[in-house]
Amino acid sequence: MEPTTDRTIYMNRELSWLKFNERVLEEAESDLTPLCERLSFASIYQSNLDEFFMVRVGSLVDQEHLSPKIRENKTHMTPAEQLHEVLRTVRRLNERKDFIYAKLLGRLEEVGVRLVDFKKIGRQESERLERYFDCEIAPLISPVIVGRRQPFPFLRNKDIYAVAVLERKNGKRRLGIISCSSGVFPRLIEVSASEKTYMLAEELILHFLPKVFAGYTVREKSLIRVTRNADIDADALYEEDIDYREFMAELIKKRRRLAPVRLELSRELDGDIVRTLCKYMDVRREHVFKNNTPLDLSFLYQIADTLRQRSELFYTRRIPQKSPALEAGRPVLDQIREEDKLLSYPYESMRPFLQMLHEAANDESVVSIKMTLYRVAKQSKVVESLIEAAENGKDVLVLVELKARFDEENNIEWSRRLEEAGCTVIYGLDGYKVHSKLCLITRMEDGMPKYYTQIGTGNYNEKTARLYTDLSVMTHDQEIGREAAEVFRTLSMGETVQETKQLLVAPHCLQDKVLAMIDGEIARARQGEDAYIGVKINSLTDKAIIDKLVQASCEGVKIDLIVRGICCLIAGVPGMTENIRVVSIVGRFLEHSRIYIFGRGERANVYIASADFMTRNTLRRVEVAAPILDKAIKARVIEMFDLMLSDNVQARLMRPDGSYSRRAPGEEEARNTQEMLYQLAYDAVAPKTV
């Protein structure tokens, strides 16, 4: 079957992502979600959208400028067409966000928390706030009046500013601007502590602009916020005679000053004023958004914190449990030598993996530890163990990916500390991000080097291991170990693996092997045998894989796709994708694990992976997928996958028009996969009663 040109089975990547963020927003709206968790989802929706504008919209703006006629390879939309649809969709979603936010404020009042402006408070409170402004805020702000001697100031990315149209008695008008994001005074100001009544600092500043700009009449005023393009191609800018780490540090500074791609207003302003602001900041009018919510919703986390004593307003407290597969009091490496081990986060604790690293750092028989780091915690026990190993004389090789977007500063700092401890640190490859989650421990046993390999779906980050669903397999299989060693050898040489047998390693040995395994299921379907593919990933955009899945569907292969975020394949289209089912789970924990299943029953080939089915992952990153060789672990992974398919609480099913509908339990028992998996983890360690 030739690659299809039928556009009815494709969805644009950017519009698909916006559908995902809409599912996040639905969690803020849902009465099934506890109130304070709804606040969190509203904030997540906004922070997601901020990053989307910084990266994806920024990229489209660049494309429109540099290659306006180029069309993306699925829906064949130009950059301008994509931008038009994106901006139109965001306006619709923001209207929904405004409505949901108003409902949330009403619910907060029911539990005794009020967020007010000056229209909702009395004279005594107003006078108290004026005194607070005069004493605590006015001395800390720096008003600017734009004129011939004072150019329009640089507005920092995502900071909030108060802007005023000022008029002199002679009728001349100017713009006044004040930063509301000093970081010195609190953003959430108590109006009445006893009644849990609050006002946002920017609203206080906006109200008292006439005091700040004495001598002027304030004709119009609004809060504004700019979002700047953060889409910088580090590889395109890098020169080999520059220290790479210092180059990345400078690149971060440059990112903060890139051109705006969005301007948000809290109030309507006269059209001429908006055009003036757009001219000063070089923002197109269609990129201006009027919001009926605060311009930054991160303060909702603070409000939630004031209600911590009300446990019914939060999810039931859950703690990662001990893995029943590992015995306490025994060295983890010894247990891995006996059989493979699987950890499932956040249901099971990351502690056995951390213990393994600590053991390796102090084991006289361990000669080396090699590891890839993409995103690590601010206070990383993983890095501390690597430093400890180096200080104990082990050969420690760490690839720190400095191009991990928005984590560069943290990674730069850790890389310095690793080098100071004596670790060998490398910083990725030209043209490729190293996104794999791979750890290799080499230990001398009976005079021979033996490998202990860990392959994961998520980052070595203790914080996200409690918030993201991920899988981590630890194995003593020597063939897998040898291939992992080859991955590290090529990385240290600035190269990539060209051939593998067990592992799937991008950029050269993952996409082709996935396509071959899909072809294997197609061949079985043609012979009338049961053919099946099951995949759980964050995103699906790789057109080669999409087209192969479409071909498999047409040949009768049954395909289940659990795709949390972007899915450029539309399922259920008659005659094309009718054998494909797409499910998205958005819930309490971020679904992050990647699972590939080819075939059913005894012949099923099961992998866990760091890679989504995105072209950037399959062809432009170093990614690793590992086969699950242990029968019990394989059965467990398949069982988890099937359980997620049965979710009828947090799951949404894609329809043939590309929309998603939440599954309803109906007469069936409610099945919330994340809660069920946590309960299974609790049950596995609970004392057995006779």
Image (cartoon, rainbow, N blue to C red):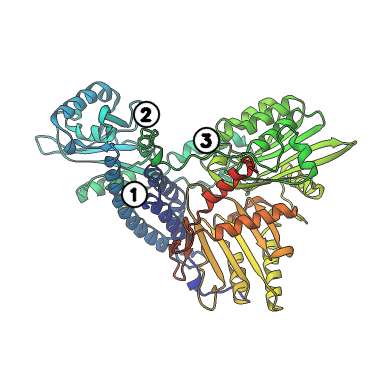
Identify the residue under disc 2: 183
The residue to which callout 3 is attached is 250
Task: Decide which of 540, 338 is in the foreground and name it.
Answer: 338
Give amino acid for label 3: Glu
Indicate which disc, 3 or 2, sits on the residue closer to the N terminus.
Answer: 2
How packed is label 1: few (under 14 Cα within 10 Å), some, or many (20 or more)? many
Q: Quadrant of residue 530?
A: bottom right
Could you tell me how far apart the alpha carbons at marks 2 and 1 are, in whole angstroms? Answer: 26 Å
Position of the C terminus, as image quadrant, is top right
The image shows residue 38 at horizontal and vertical percentages of: 38, 46
Q: Residue at x 43, y 43 (%)?
A: 258
- Mark 2 and mark 1 lie on one chain; the one further toward the N terminus is 2
Whole-percent x, y for residue 644 in the image = 56, 57
Q: Nearer the viewer, residue 688 or 44?
A: 688
Q: Amino acid at mark 2?
A: Gly
Front residue (pair 111, 97): 111
- Asked whether residue 436 is in view, the answer is no
Measuring from the top left, give residue 4's x and y in whole percent: 56, 74
Distance CA(mark 3)–CA(mark 2): 23 Å
Quarter of the view holding residue 130: top left
State which quadrant residue 637 falls in.
bottom right
Type of amino acid at the residue the image marks with label 1:
Val
Q: Secondary structure at mark 1?
A: loop
Instruction: Tell which residue pokes out farthest to the right in this image.
Output: 447
Q: Is residue 103 left or right of residue 17?
A: left
550 lies above or below 369: below
The kind of secondary structure element at disc 3 is helix
